[in-house]
Image: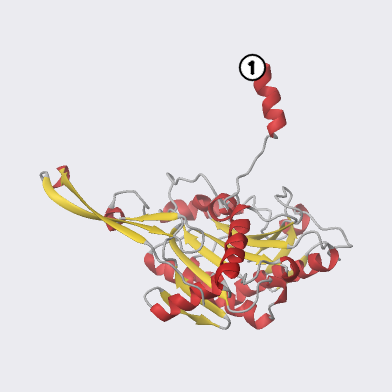
Amino acid sequence: MGPIAFERAESRVVVRNPLRGFAPEEQRVEVRRDPLLGGTSVLNPFLASKAGFFGENDRPFIARLAAESAASCVFCGGALERRTAMYPEDLVPGGRIARGEATLLPNLFALGAYHPLVVLSRAHFLELDDFTPALLADGLGLAREFLRRVHARDRQAPYAFVGANYLLPAGASIVHPHLQMLVTPLPYTRHERLLDACRGHHEQHGGSLLDDLAAEEERLGARFIGRRGGWRWVAAFAPQGCNEILAVHETAGDFAEIDEGEVHELAAGVAAVLGAYARIGLLCFNYALFSVRRDVAAPGFRLFFRIVSRQNLSPAYRNDDYYLQKLLDADLVVTPPEELARQMRAAW
């Protein structure tokens, strides 16, 4: 096993707090470096009590939002069949795939070569405790089935990503619970950085960077949460988002290759994290699953899952990104740079 470095630097900061009559107050600030990709995170426990930083869920507002948005939701009831897109028959016979309450269909506004959506539930709004393992397994199972179809059809799209945005602060444009999948010829930024890190670790130390991280966290115990099937779950050492939890599969790197049991174990882990978020008082989240087809994967790459919480939902929620930016380090471009340059030149 190659070395896994857990770097941190702690500082003590003294301020005279005007809220306490300018009495001296000491705060502890800690900067940590992500052992996978080197990004830094800043921890200050005092921020947990900062008024309005995360905010409380506004239950009357949420109830009103759920009721009003359900009236025009394209994923609710018969509207799903009448108003959502369908795939060509040669890719998905019948245009859509269904399992349990879940339905897979194409995104009208694609962000990759293949970009399906999976509507998870008949219910328009779910509390986090309502994301059951069975519900999540049906949705993730459809994503895996679609990925298998793409692998069999298109050898030029080996990189896959499954992501979710739940509710407005997480970047969701639709309240109705759903997940998304991107299958692409090129890996997006964080995906590529992860593959490069796995490749470099294997060349220098042998083995798998992701597996070594999970094994070291399990050995240390402080952030290790537990195992579910072949998945090991840990709290991120240097979180790249609030309340970040990671999962690494012991052997597989291609989501299309894992069996039904491992899909259910992943779903059970996600449901457990969401249940814990609910007990903390959270509601909104993003998650990401990184996958690569075996023949092009970096040595030692493993299926890698991340989930983070977002600001709670109230009329004054804030948001400036969703899974694409938050978890893939890729940004969404609406205006082609060439068109932007044309517009700029016209005003120059």
Compared across the picture, whether 89 is left or right of 234 comes to right
Instruction: Name the spot of residue 126 as percent of width and height, x first.
Output: 53, 64
Compared with 3, 171 (above or below) is above
Residue 70 picture quarter: bottom right
Q: Does 198 appear above or below 310?
A: below
Q: Nearer the viewer, residue 302 or 184?
A: 302
Q: Which residue is at 44% across, 45% downward?
A: 315
Please give the residue where the numbered disc 1 appears in the rendered image: 347
Q: Is residue 272 visible?
A: no
Q: Amino acid at mark 1?
A: Ala
Q: How is the image coloured?
A: secondary structure
Looking at the image, which is closer to me, 202 or 259? 202
- Neighbours of disc 1 within 10 Å: few (<14), some (14-19), many (20+): few
Pick whichever, 247 or 88, lies toward us. 247
Residue 177 drawn at (x, y percent): 59, 61
Where in the figure is residue 265, as x and y percent of width and height?
58, 79
Name the side, left or right, on which 317 lies relative to 72: left
Q: Residue at x 69, y 71 (%)?
A: 254
User: What residue is at 83 percent from the left and 68 percent from the top?
Assistant: 152
Say whether residue 42 is left or right of residue 269: left
> Label 1's element?
helix
**Name of the residue lying farthest toward the right:** 90
Return the x and y of residue 43 as percentages of the image width and height: 34, 57
Of 199 and 124, the residue lying toward us? 199
Does residue 72 appear in the picture of this structure? Answer: yes
